[in-house]
Image (tube, grey):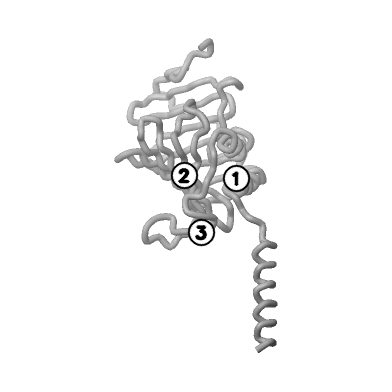
Amino acid sequence: MLKRWISLLLLLGLNISAIFGQEIITAEKYLEMVSETYGTIRDYEANITIRSGNTEMTGTVSHLMPAFLRIDFTRPADQVIVFNGELLTVYLPEFRAVLSQNVNQSRRSAGLATAQGLTMLRRNYVPSFVTGPNPEPLESNSRERVVKLRLTRRSISEGFREIILSINADTKLIRRMEGRTIADGELRFDFTNIKLNQGIPELRFFYDSPASANIYPNFLFRDSD
């Protein structure tokens, strides 16, 4: 009997040591780990699906550090969004229109699924786990498992009330972003077939507008605003 008690106490003690020897991963720490992962990425390419209400857009997104971004859409076909660090260009083939906007340093913002974007999220939102730090299904009946973080805004000046990040537990890459706007609208980004550090050239982010398209400069704001 004594030997059994000793064995049980030793087993309990070893288990307690193992429990307390593990680092407790908080939501803030997990978001920091994700941010560090994105900090190692020089360029990024993925299939992207954007859903807003009943509207769905699909295409390929490319990103090059520090601020180059391009989305080539397959739906709507041939639509393009390009930002080369200074000039934002949107081509709308349905209207044969090119919308352009010069963006100075003070107005420049980082994409959310980038190291800079994640730094902004950590500064402006409070993270918490949706259910806990363990992977869970991406959605009902899904075999894909992710860690979900809920980001709640620190001030009313933020454009989204909350953002849900679904993060691949193995790669620490964002698989899905879901945002709820101030007007209670929902916006969802899905990233699949992600490829990293392929050596994407800067030339990809300089766009030649179709000669027949009408150009509308400063469609967001005037440089003097």
Say whether residue 86 is left or right of residue 161.
right
Tell me residue 128's x, y (percent): 52, 46
The numbered mark, 1 or 2, whose residue comes first in the sequence reads 1
Along the line of sight, the residue nearer the viewer: 149 or 171: 149
Task: Give the spatial CA distance, label 1 vs label 2.
Answer: 14 Å
User: Label 2, on which residue?
Assistant: 164
Tell me residue 88's x, y (percent): 51, 26
Say whether residue 207 is left or right of residue 8.
left
As helix, strand or loop, the secondary structure at mark 1 comes to helix
Q: Residue at x 50, y 32 (%)?
A: 82
The numbered mark, 3 or 1, whose residue comes first in the sequence reads 1
Q: Amino acid at mark 1?
A: Glu
User: Label 3, on which residue?
Assistant: 135
As helix, strand or loop, the secondary structure at mark 2 comes to strand
Q: Amino acid at mark 3?
A: Pro
Q: Residue at x 45, y 45 (%)?
A: 48
